[in-house]
Amino acid sequence: MIVRILGEGQLQVDDSATDELNVLDAALEKAVNSGDEQALRPALAALLDRVRSLGTPLAEDAIEPSDLILPYSDADLEDVRELITGEGLIPG
Amino acid sequence: MSVMKRVSLIFKSKANKALDRMEDPRETLDYSYQRQLEMLTQVRRGVADVATSRKRVELQMNTLQQQQNKLEGQAKQALGAGREDLAREALSRRATLQTQYADLETQYHSLQADEEKLTAASQRLQAKVEAFRTQKETIKATYTAAEAQTRIGEAVSGISEEMGDVGMAVQRAQDKTAQMQARAGAIDELMASGALDDVTGTGRDDIQAELDQMRGGQDVELELERLKGEIGGAPKREIESGPVDGAAQPSPATPAEQPQAGESS
């Protein structure tokens, strides 16, 4: 599958990583839902780090939609909320 | 629903809107390509903005550094003149500047990181726009409605996602740059007001003024003594030998260059 980390680009990640990433994503989701800024930072960092270490960057000239898109690394609670509601997103 | 899936869905729906806009899919390609070129311009401008901001912060850091050095010099000078109070004042101002400097340094590194990220994003987009242009021409040349629909869909949603990402990155960098510009402007104003001490030395620097006054006071005293000696008619070398005529309380004439810690004021 192709995963995009916003602000960093796309990576090819093996499908076998799905379960592991889902666990990390669940922690992030929990932090977002409970509005816990303290928990959000490490949860996001853990998810992104795992994707970075598992994935291989896609060629720069590859034009492919991603299967999953992750928030940028310095996103705070408000940023993530905007991302999942589509606010602040510039339509292409 | 999971965060990664929700973000992906948002991006997909934006891409689909771009696709639905046109009746003829080939128009979608041209329209998307136009948008890509605009976005490239925007990203490059974004990189330039961040670079400008970084340079400004760099200049301010240099100025603050010079100012800190100057204050340290003043503190030494004041101590040499036995003015611990003045030295203390100079050092406490220097401490304020150190805090400002540390703040600027953080900003500087943050801008540097943004600049690198945006430059990389700009290169990625550039490579994709070029690839898209080639694909676009191929799709148009071999156009059959059914096939084109799918290929156009993929190409456009792929690039649309990239543009959404880059567009956001530029927006964020520009927001951040604007904030930093405002803070940089505030520091400039603070410097201009003399509150942080004035680097231009236009007379607002009260520590320097006091040090100058002290030295000036000494110089005047010395000059006064020299004149007294001359009026007394005594040749310089004789002054040391004692009173001549009515010369009132002569004291040793000292060359003006010789620094002397005086008790004056």
Image (cartoon, rainbow, N blue to C red):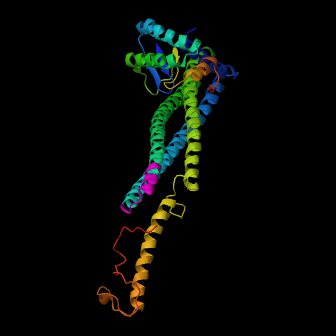
Q: Work out whether A63 lies above or below B224.
A: above
Closer to the camera in the image, B18 or A22 = A22
Whole-percent x, y for residue B92 in the image: 46, 49
Q: Work out whether A15 lies above or below B224.
A: above
Whole-percent x, y for residue B214 in the image: 45, 68
Q: Quadrant of residue B217?
A: bottom left
Whole-percent x, y for residue B58 in the image: 46, 47
Name the quadrant of the N terminus of chain B: top right
Q: Quadrant of residue B216?
A: bottom left
Closer to the camera in the image, B147 or A11 = A11
Closer to the camera in the image, B162 or B210 = B210
Kindly report the secondary structure that dominates the magenta region of the rendered protein: helix
Q: Is residue B183 magenta?
A: no
State which region is magenta.
Answer: B80-92
Asked whether residue A66 is in view, the answer is no
Q: Work out whether B264 lies above or below B221.
A: above
**Is B43 on the left-hand or right-hand side of B83?**
right
- Residue at the spot x=30%, y=85% of the render? B240
Whole-percent x, y for residue B125 in the image: 51, 31
